[in-house]
Amino acid sequence: DAGVTQSPTHLIKTRGQQVTLRCSPISGHKSVSWYQQVLGQGPQFIFQYYEKEERGRGNFPDRFSARQFPNYSSELNVNALLLGDSALYLCASSLNSQTNEKLFFGSGTQLSVL
Amino acid sequence: AQSVTQLGSHVSVSEGALVLLRCNYSSSVPPYLFWYVQYPNQGLQLLLKYTSAATLVKGINGFEAEFKKSETSFHLTKPSAHMSDAAEYFCAVSESGYSTLTFGKGTMLLVSP
Protein backbone atom coordinates (compact mmCIF):
# COMPACT_ATOMS: atom_id res chain seq x y z
CA ASP A 1 0.00 0.00 0.00
CA ALA A 2 1.20 3.49 -0.80
CA GLY A 3 2.14 5.74 2.08
CA VAL A 4 1.49 9.45 2.35
CA THR A 5 2.59 11.09 -0.88
CA GLN A 6 3.50 14.74 -1.26
CA SER A 7 4.20 16.78 -4.36
CA PRO A 8 6.35 18.37 -5.45
CA THR A 9 9.40 17.13 -3.51
CA HIS A 10 11.32 20.35 -4.06
CA LEU A 11 10.21 23.83 -5.00
CA ILE A 12 11.98 27.14 -5.51
CA LYS A 13 10.00 30.38 -5.40
CA THR A 14 10.77 34.07 -5.06
CA ARG A 15 9.50 36.47 -2.45
CA GLY A 16 5.92 37.59 -3.01
CA GLN A 17 4.92 34.56 -5.05
CA GLN A 18 2.24 32.04 -4.14
CA VAL A 19 2.73 28.30 -3.75
CA THR A 20 0.47 25.25 -3.55
CA LEU A 21 1.63 22.01 -1.95
CA ARG A 22 -0.28 18.76 -2.35
CA CYS A 23 -0.77 15.72 -0.18
CA SER A 24 -2.45 12.37 -0.73
CA PRO A 25 -3.17 10.45 2.49
CA ILE A 26 -2.98 6.73 2.99
CA SER A 27 -6.04 5.00 1.57
CA GLY A 28 -8.82 4.98 4.16
CA HIS A 29 -7.37 7.84 6.22
CA LYS A 30 -9.77 10.73 6.66
CA SER A 31 -7.57 13.18 8.58
CA VAL A 32 -4.71 15.23 7.15
CA SER A 33 -2.39 17.51 9.09
CA TRP A 34 0.26 19.95 7.86
CA TYR A 35 3.49 20.81 9.66
CA GLN A 36 6.30 23.26 8.89
CA GLN A 37 9.85 22.21 9.76
CA VAL A 38 12.42 24.98 9.61
CA LEU A 39 16.04 23.83 9.43
CA GLY A 40 17.30 22.93 12.90
CA GLN A 41 13.86 22.99 14.50
CA GLY A 42 11.11 20.51 15.22
CA PRO A 43 7.98 20.43 13.08
CA GLN A 44 5.37 23.07 13.91
CA PHE A 45 1.66 22.41 13.49
CA ILE A 46 -0.11 24.45 10.80
CA PHE A 47 -3.50 22.83 10.11
CA GLN A 48 -5.55 19.72 10.65
CA TYR A 49 -8.48 18.68 8.47
CA TYR A 50 -10.92 15.88 9.10
CA GLU A 51 -13.77 14.96 6.81
CA LYS A 52 -13.10 18.13 4.81
CA GLU A 53 -13.52 20.39 7.82
CA GLU A 54 -10.78 22.36 9.57
CA ARG A 55 -10.29 20.86 13.03
CA GLY A 56 -7.27 22.81 14.18
CA ARG A 57 -5.04 25.70 13.24
CA GLY A 58 -1.61 26.58 14.54
CA ASN A 59 -0.08 29.99 15.07
CA PHE A 60 0.45 30.93 11.44
CA PRO A 61 -0.60 34.08 9.55
CA ASP A 62 -3.58 34.21 7.25
CA ARG A 63 -1.21 33.89 4.28
CA PHE A 64 -1.39 30.17 5.03
CA SER A 65 -4.54 28.34 4.01
CA ALA A 66 -5.52 24.77 3.29
CA ARG A 67 -8.39 22.63 2.17
CA GLN A 68 -9.33 18.99 1.97
CA PHE A 69 -11.10 17.42 -0.96
CA PRO A 70 -13.83 14.74 -1.06
CA ASN A 71 -11.18 12.10 -1.75
CA TYR A 72 -9.39 13.29 1.45
CA SER A 73 -6.37 14.67 -0.39
CA SER A 74 -5.29 18.11 0.72
CA GLU A 75 -3.62 21.28 -0.49
CA LEU A 76 -1.65 23.82 1.49
CA ASN A 77 -1.46 27.31 -0.01
CA VAL A 78 0.94 30.03 1.02
CA ASN A 79 0.52 33.54 -0.40
CA ALA A 80 2.96 36.44 -0.50
CA LEU A 81 5.95 34.24 0.26
CA LEU A 82 8.61 35.49 2.65
CA LEU A 83 12.19 34.30 3.02
CA GLY A 84 11.19 32.85 6.39
CA ASP A 85 8.73 30.51 4.74
CA SER A 86 11.66 28.43 3.49
CA ALA A 87 11.20 25.08 5.19
CA LEU A 88 10.29 21.44 4.82
CA TYR A 89 6.51 21.11 4.75
CA LEU A 90 5.28 17.80 6.07
CA CYS A 91 1.89 16.24 5.56
CA ALA A 92 0.61 13.55 7.91
CA SER A 93 -2.49 11.40 7.70
CA SER A 94 -4.40 9.36 10.23
CA LEU A 95 -7.57 7.30 10.31
CA ASN A 96 -9.45 9.86 12.35
CA SER A 97 -8.73 12.89 14.48
CA GLN A 98 -8.32 11.34 17.92
CA THR A 99 -5.52 12.45 20.24
CA ASN A 100 -3.49 9.27 20.31
CA GLU A 101 -4.11 8.31 16.73
CA LYS A 102 -0.92 7.33 14.94
CA LEU A 103 0.22 9.88 12.38
CA PHE A 104 1.87 8.69 9.18
CA PHE A 105 4.15 11.33 7.68
CA GLY A 106 5.11 11.90 4.09
CA SER A 107 8.66 12.75 3.05
CA GLY A 108 7.77 16.40 2.69
CA THR A 109 8.10 19.23 0.23
CA GLN A 110 11.27 21.29 0.54
CA LEU A 111 10.36 24.91 -0.21
CA SER A 112 13.09 27.44 -0.86
CA VAL A 113 12.14 31.11 -1.08
CA LEU A 114 14.76 33.35 -2.71
CA ALA B 1 -0.11 25.50 26.96
CA GLN B 2 1.95 22.45 26.18
CA SER B 3 5.66 22.37 25.41
CA VAL B 4 8.55 19.95 25.09
CA THR B 5 12.22 20.47 25.92
CA GLN B 6 14.86 18.15 24.55
CA LEU B 7 18.20 18.44 26.31
CA GLY B 8 21.15 18.31 23.95
CA SER B 9 20.92 19.08 20.27
CA HIS B 10 23.52 16.39 19.57
CA VAL B 11 24.32 13.14 21.39
CA SER B 12 27.29 10.97 20.41
CA VAL B 13 27.65 7.33 21.40
CA SER B 14 29.77 4.40 20.35
CA GLU B 15 28.22 1.38 18.69
CA GLY B 16 27.02 -0.98 21.41
CA ALA B 17 26.74 1.74 24.05
CA LEU B 18 23.60 2.84 25.88
CA VAL B 19 21.50 5.48 24.16
CA LEU B 20 19.75 8.06 26.35
CA LEU B 21 17.85 10.95 24.81
CA ARG B 22 16.18 13.34 27.23
CA CYS B 23 12.74 14.89 26.98
CA ASN B 24 10.85 17.00 29.51
CA TYR B 25 7.32 18.16 28.93
CA SER B 26 4.97 20.81 30.20
CA SER B 27 1.25 20.20 30.05
CA SER B 28 -1.78 21.47 31.93
CA VAL B 29 -3.61 18.17 31.50
CA PRO B 30 -2.47 14.52 31.42
CA PRO B 31 -0.47 14.39 28.24
CA TYR B 32 -0.05 12.00 25.38
CA LEU B 33 3.67 11.70 24.61
CA PHE B 34 5.46 10.50 21.51
CA TRP B 35 8.93 9.86 20.15
CA TYR B 36 9.53 10.16 16.42
CA VAL B 37 12.66 9.46 14.36
CA GLN B 38 13.64 11.25 11.17
CA TYR B 39 16.22 9.85 8.79
CA PRO B 40 17.85 12.19 6.22
CA ASN B 41 15.50 13.32 3.47
CA GLN B 42 12.61 11.39 4.97
CA GLY B 43 9.49 12.12 6.95
CA LEU B 44 8.92 11.27 10.58
CA GLN B 45 8.39 7.72 11.79
CA LEU B 46 6.69 6.91 15.09
CA LEU B 47 8.96 5.05 17.53
CA LEU B 48 6.57 4.81 20.46
CA LYS B 49 3.75 6.59 22.27
CA TYR B 50 2.52 6.97 25.85
CA THR B 51 -1.22 7.08 26.37
CA SER B 52 -1.46 6.40 30.15
CA ALA B 53 -1.81 2.62 29.82
CA ALA B 54 1.68 1.85 31.16
CA THR B 55 4.54 4.06 32.31
CA LEU B 56 7.20 1.99 30.50
CA VAL B 57 6.55 2.01 26.79
CA LYS B 58 8.30 -0.27 24.33
CA GLY B 59 8.69 0.81 20.75
CA ILE B 60 10.21 -0.32 17.51
CA ASN B 61 13.90 -1.04 16.87
CA GLY B 62 14.59 -1.83 20.54
CA PHE B 63 13.76 1.63 21.89
CA GLU B 64 11.75 2.25 25.03
CA ALA B 65 10.74 5.24 27.12
CA GLU B 66 9.55 5.72 30.68
CA PHE B 67 6.92 8.25 31.69
CA LYS B 68 7.77 9.88 35.04
CA LYS B 69 5.06 12.26 36.13
CA SER B 70 7.00 13.53 39.17
CA GLU B 71 9.88 14.55 36.93
CA THR B 72 7.69 15.53 33.92
CA SER B 73 10.05 13.45 31.81
CA PHE B 74 9.77 10.94 28.98
CA HIS B 75 13.36 9.93 28.21
CA LEU B 76 14.13 7.57 25.33
CA THR B 77 16.60 4.72 25.82
CA LYS B 78 18.11 1.81 23.94
CA PRO B 79 20.51 -0.62 25.63
CA SER B 80 22.88 -1.01 22.69
CA ALA B 81 23.31 1.49 19.87
CA HIS B 82 23.57 0.39 16.27
CA MET B 83 25.00 2.36 13.39
CA SER B 84 21.56 2.38 11.78
CA ASP B 85 20.19 4.33 14.78
CA ALA B 86 21.98 7.48 13.61
CA ALA B 87 19.17 9.94 12.91
CA GLU B 88 17.32 12.87 14.44
CA TYR B 89 14.88 12.12 17.23
CA PHE B 90 11.91 14.26 18.20
CA CYS B 91 9.85 14.17 21.36
CA ALA B 92 6.27 15.43 21.02
CA VAL B 93 3.26 16.07 23.24
CA SER B 94 -0.45 16.28 22.57
CA GLU B 95 -3.16 17.27 25.00
CA SER B 96 -5.98 18.42 22.76
CA GLY B 97 -8.84 16.32 21.53
CA TYR B 98 -7.30 16.06 18.11
CA SER B 99 -4.03 14.68 16.87
CA THR B 100 -2.08 17.94 16.88
CA LEU B 101 1.46 17.55 18.14
CA THR B 102 3.88 20.00 19.73
CA PHE B 103 7.43 18.90 18.94
CA GLY B 104 10.72 19.55 20.65
CA LYS B 105 13.66 20.92 18.68
CA GLY B 106 15.11 17.47 18.17
CA THR B 107 18.28 15.61 19.14
CA MET B 108 20.69 14.36 16.52
CA LEU B 109 22.07 10.95 17.50
CA LEU B 110 25.55 10.22 16.17
CA VAL B 111 26.85 6.64 16.39
CA SER B 112 30.54 5.94 15.91
CA PRO B 113 32.08 2.52 15.24
Image: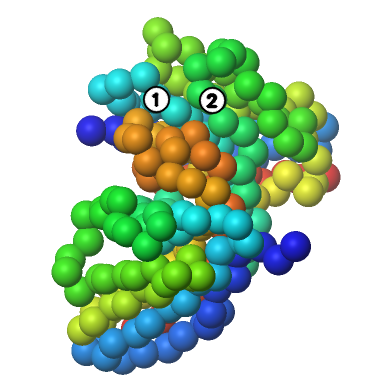
The residue that appears at 48% across and 66% down in the rendered structure is A72
The residue that appears at 17% across and 66% down in the rendered structure is A61
Residue type, label 1: Pro
Q: Height in image: B63 above or below A43?
A: above
Q: Is residue A68 visible?
A: yes
Q: Is residue B18 left or right of residue A114?
A: right
For residue B15, which numbered disc appears in the image? none
Q: Height in image: B94 above or below B89?
A: above
The residue that appears at 52% across and 39% down in the rendered structure is A101
Image quadrant assignment for residue A1: bottom right
A61 or B71, nearer to the observer: A61
Chain where mark 2 sits: B
Of labels 2 and 1, earlier in sequence is 1
Question: Which residue carries the number 1 mark?
Answer: B31
Q: Height in image: A95 above or below B67?
A: below
Question: Which residue carries the number 2 mark?
Answer: B50
Tell me the element at label 2. strand
Q: CA distance from mark 2 to mark 1?
A: 8 Å
Q: Position of residue A8 (x, y in %)?
A: 53, 82
Q: Position of residue B7 (x, y in %)?
A: 45, 33
Tell me the element at label 1. loop
Question: Residue reaching furthest top?
Answer: B70
Chain where mark 1 sits: B
Q: Position of residue A5 (x, y in %)?
A: 60, 70
